[in-house]
Amino acid sequence: MSDKSWLVIQYPLKSLKGSKRDHWLREKVSEYVEMVLSEDELGYVDGSDIGRSVADPNTYVLNIFCVVTQEAVAIAQVKRVLRESRLDHTRVKIATMPEGGETYTLQYAARKGVTDFSL
């Protein structure tokens, strides 16, 4: 059994390709999250994508994928770095899935009442 999990940081977008700021956000979030995960030996950023949501093709999202070891600690550190760095922490969703799993589970949503998650 693996102790690794996938963690995805998701932001809603207004367009399929994203704006200049969306691309800047992808770079900065990836950079800051990579720093905090590697400093704390919690994992690493594995990549990102911008595009249509799988669940709703009329919705656009930015996904940043990470592989983490200590899921709860990694989530707390990601939330902290997004908040402290002012990287749109009020719009973010964070979900996890065990390595080898098939479904992500929403772990955090900045907006109250949000309970669903889909890539």
Image (tube, rainbow, N blue to C red):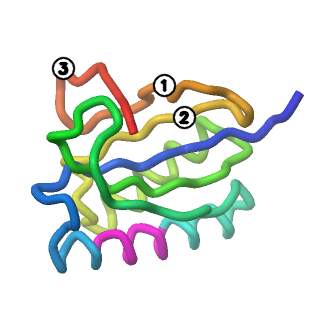
Q: Is residue 39 above or below residue 71?
A: below
Residue at x 17% of width, y 55% of height: 13
Q: Disc 1 or 2, which lies upstream in sequence?
A: 2
Q: Which residue is mark 2?
A: 96
* Three-letter code, disc 2: Thr
Q: Earlier in the sequence, mark 2 or mark 3?
A: 2
Above/below status of 87 relative to 72: below
Can you give x and y, in whole percent of width and height, for residue 65 in the image? 53, 54
Q: Which residue is under mark 1?
A: 105
Residue type at mark 1: give it. Thr
Upstream in sequence: badge 1 or badge 3 = 1
Please provide the residue range marked out in magenta. 25-32
Q: Quadrant of residue 50?
A: bottom left
Q: Amino acid at mark 3?
A: Gly
For disc 3, the marked residue is 113
Which quadrant: the C terminus?
Answer: top left
- Residue 40: x and y in percent read 68, 61
Q: Quadrant of residue 66?
A: bottom right
